[in-house]
Amino acid sequence: MIRFGPSGCGEEFLEEGYASLLQVPDFIKSKGLNAFEYSFGHGYRMREELARTAGKLFQKNDIKVSIHAPYYINFANPEEEMYQKSEGYLRTGIKFLRYFGNADHLVFHTGSCGKIERKQCIALATKRLEETMDRFEEEKLLEGIWLCPETMGKPLQIGTYKEIVDLCKLNSHLVPTFDFGHINALTQGSLKGKEEYKHILDYAIEILGKDRVNNCHIHFSKIQYGEKGEIRHLNFEDEIYGPDYEPLMEVLADYNLEARVISESAGMQPRDAKIMKDFYDKLKKH
């Protein structure tokens, strides 16, 4: 089943009198949504007990949880210490997926090139991620879990859609996070309609197969961009930068993908997630 939800709760959460993580499941359900992404972008600052308690409430409300790992991950950093930390961030993220119980997608940034030539950067990140996944397999950490490298919005970051799909060939528990706002920003507004979205998903299906792509993670928001790619997230009120969600919803409906669609709109994540869900539901009724 395709699911829609926000990354974080946006401005509405506090405006409506909510205050704590334990109130998030009721809030998400009240918006007619059934997915939620919790970001640990700045580190894992949550007690295990709280995650387990919140997880039971998410399960009670039939809300699937995704986790965004810390932004510090960089499998392309040549320093061995940074590699060990990056693997550790994924390992801890998997623990939190288990704590939440109803969580199965761990989103992460693969890394950035810095001063390293891009081909060398990608080769190093690929080697290290493969080694990490092999260790996780040996330790039997991955049952029922998808690790989701994300497409990125700046040229120095690893994360074109082809780079991410190719990384996912390393292990059957890797599936892409397609951030279409990032893709659009990186390519200077290339996502114009259905054909551009189909081209990306068709490539993924050809390389990974329909079953894997069926479990992909999707981030969506409009994003302001410049010559160096992504500048800042916007919401659906923007009429300049795009991309538009309607053609993506049409492709998802045509392909019957059961993806997780997460809104990252600036301040309006739940509202824009519901707009996408309502549009998608109308398509499926016709």
Image (cartoon, helix red, strand yellow):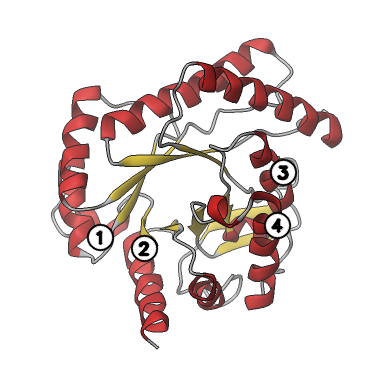
> Which is nearer the N-term, disc 4 or disc 1?
1
Image mark for residue 206 = 4
Residue corresponding to mark 3: 166
> Which is nearer the N-term, disc 2 or disc 3?
3
The image position of residue 85, as x and y in percent, is 55, 17
Callout 4 touching callout 1 (CB < 8 Å): no
- Mark 3 vs mark 1, foreground winner is 3
Q: Residue at x 49, y 26 (%)?
A: 90
Q: How many marks?
A: 4
Label 4 – label 3 distance at C-alpha: 11 Å
> Which is nearer the N-term, disc 3 or disc 1?
1
Counting other residues with Cα less than 10 Å from the Cα at mark 3, is it few (<14), some (14-19), or many (20 or more)? some
Label 3 – label 1 distance at C-alpha: 38 Å
Where disc 1 sits, the SS reads helix
- Mark 4 vs mark 1, foreground winner is 4
Where disc 2 sits, the SS reads loop
> Which is nearer the N-term, disc 4 or disc 2?
4
Residue corresponding to mark 2: 268
Q: Residue at x 68, y 76 (%)?
A: 195
Residue corresponding to mark 1: 12
Callout 1 touching callout 2 (CB < 8 Å): yes
Counting other residues with Cα less than 10 Å from the Cα at mark 1, is it few (<14), some (14-19), or many (20 or more)? some
Is any part of residue 256 visible from this angle?
yes
Three-letter amino acid code at the position of disc 4: Glu
Please name whichever residue, 56 or 108, is drawn nearer the observer in this view of the structure: 56
Counting other residues with Cα less than 10 Å from the Cα at mark 2, is it few (<14), some (14-19), or many (20 or more)? many
Q: Residue at x 67, y 11 (%)?
A: 80
> Looking at the picture, does residue 216 appear above or below residue 251?
above
